[in-house]
Amino acid sequence: MAKLPGGLVPGRGRRLSHPRDGRAAAGAGSVPGAVPVPRYRFLLSCCSSPPRAGAMAGPGGGGDTGDAGDVLSGGSERRCRARLAAAGAGGAAAAAAVLVPLCSVRGRPALLFTLRSRRLAGPHSGDVSFPGGRRDPADGDAVATALRETREELGVAVAPASVWGQLRTLPDRHGMTVAPVVANLGPLEALTLNPNPDEVEEVFTLPLAHLLRKENQGYTHFRTASGYGYTLPVFLNGPHKVWGLTAIITELTLELLLPSCYRRKTHVPPQKASA
C-alpha cells in the first residue's frame, strides 16, 4: 500500500501472545511483553486504559460501547451493509483487493492488521497493511480476491456470509486500483491464525477505542511544486504506525462504523481545469 515518509513509533499498548500459539505462550501466557515467535508474532494489542465514556457511542446516542455489543451487533451490521450497498462500490472493478478484518479482542471491537514480510520484493515490503493482493484471473470479483488472499496470508477461511460489503475503490501511489472489502471475523480468540512467513511478518490488532482517541490520530500535509498538495491520516502509538493507503482505508472504516465519532482527515484538493 502507499507509504508515507517517517519511521515506526514505539507502541504504548500491551502485547499479548495469541492463546493458540503454543510457542509464544510457553512461559509467557497473557503476560505483557511475551517472547516473540521466530519470524512472526501473534499480537493482541489492547488499550493501556479503558475507553472514555461515550468514545464508542454510535450515531443513535451516548454511552460507552467499549465492548463488541454495539459496533459489531446485528443492528450495526445491517446499517453498514445497507450503507455499503447504497454506495454501489461493489460493482467497481479493481486490480487488487484487501480484506478489512473487523474482529473482537476480549470483547472489544478491533481491526486486524499485518506487517508485510521483508522477504517480499517490491515497494510494499515491511509495510503495515491489510491482507490482500492483486486480482487473480480466476477470481470472480474483489470479494473473491480479498478472501483468497486472506486465506493464503493468514490461513483463515473467511465465509462469504461474513462479508459486509465493499468500500470505495482507491488508487495506490502507483495508480493501481484497490478495493477494500469489509468482513467480520468475530472473536479473534476463537480463530487459529497460521500466517505465511513468506508474506506476513507480524499480525496485530488495534481496538477501535484506541483508533478513536485524539492522541492516537495524526495527519501529514504534502506539498507540490505549486504549494499545498493533500492531507493524509496517520494512526499512532500502536505496535506500528498505520499510514498510507492502509490509514485511508482505516478511516473510511471508522467513518462507516461510527460516523458521529470520527471525522475524515484525508483531503485532496480538486484538480484545476486545464486551460
Image (cartoon, grey):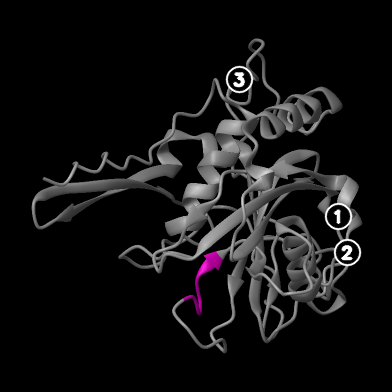
Badge count: 3
> Is residue 221 placed above or below 32 in the rendered structure?
above
In this view, the residue in front, 181 or 69, is 181
Q: Secondary structure at mark 3?
A: loop
Q: Residue at x 74, y 27 (%)?
A: 82
Q: Residue at x 82, y 53 (%)?
A: 188
Any part of residue 196 in sight? yes
Which of the marked residues, 2 or 1, is nearer the chain's N terminus? 2
Q: Where does the image place residue 78, in percent across and percent down from the top left?
A: 80, 27
Q: Residues in magenta?
A: 124-128
For label 2, the residue is: 157
Badge 3: few (under 14), some or many (20 or more) residues near its Cα, within 10 Å?
few
For label 3, the residue is: 53
Eye-nearest disc, 2 or 3: 2
Circle 3: residue type = Ala
Which label is found at residue 197? none
Badge 1: few (under 14), some or many (20 or more) residues near its Cα, within 10 Å?
some
Verify CB contact (< 8 Å) between mark 2 and mark 1.
Answer: no
152 to the left or right of 11: right
